[in-house]
Structures are given as structure tokens and as C-alpha cells.
């Protein structure tokens, strides 16, 4: 209870006229995109790192074996 006996306001309430303005919509869109990007980056940071599969040849790897047994696996 406040000194005047009324309820204590909790949180922040904006008037309806402010919520319908164009700049508030732009700000809300920016915050939404920022939140999605932050969540995507945080999820990517938590997931294990994905390495290139072994079936892709790297630049320093030969396309064919040069050993005695040409049919042997690389």
C-alpha cells in the first residue's frame, strides 16, 4: 500500500496512443529481430562444432592413391 492508501503500480504501462505510433513499431521490430539473432547465435555457440566430412577432399589431398595397392582406401 502507498501513503495514499491506493495500490502500488508495478511495472511500466504505456498509454495506447504511444503504442500505436510508427517509431514504437520500428523499435519493437528492431528488438524482435535482435532477440531472434541473439537466440540463434547462442544456440549455435552451444551446439557441437560441425566438421567437414571425410568424404570431401581437401586441397592438399591427392585424388588417387600412389601406393603399391591402387585400390586400397585412402
Image (cartoon, helix red, strand yellow):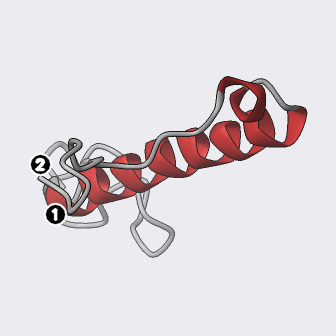
Q: What is the x, y in percent for residue 28? A: 64, 39
41 is higher (above) or lower (below) than 67: above
From the viewer's side, name the closer residue of 28 and 33. 28
| Residue at image location 43% in from the left, 64% down from the top | 58
Q: What is the x, y in percent for residue 13? A: 48, 40
From the viewer's side, name the closer residue of 34 and 6. 6
- Under circle 1, the secondary element is loop
Left or right of residue 72, residue 59 in this image: right
Q: Give the residue number, with chain letter if any, for mark 2.
A: 72
Residue 69 image-quadrant placement: bottom left
4 is higher (above) or lower (below) than 68: above
Q: Give the residue number, with chain letter if any, for mark 1.
A: 68
| Residue at image location 31% in from the left, 66% down from the top | 66
Tally the marks: 2
- Under circle 2, the secondary element is loop
From the viewer's side, name the closer residue of 32 and 6. 6
Left or right of residue 52, residue 24 in this image: right
Amino acid at each position: 500500500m502507498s501513503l495514499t492508501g491506493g495500490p502500488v503500480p508495478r511495472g511500466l504501462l504505456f498509454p495506447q496512443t504511444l503504442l500505436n505510433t510508427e517509431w514504437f513499431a520500428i523499435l519493437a521490430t528492431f528488438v524482435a529481430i535482435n532477440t531472434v539473432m541473439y537466440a540463434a547465435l547462442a544456440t549455435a555457440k552451444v551446439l557441437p562444432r560441425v566438421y567437414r566430412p571425410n568424404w570431401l577432399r581437401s586441397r592438399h589431398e591427392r585424388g588417387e592413391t600412389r601406393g603399391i595397392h591402387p585400390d586400397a582406401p585412402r
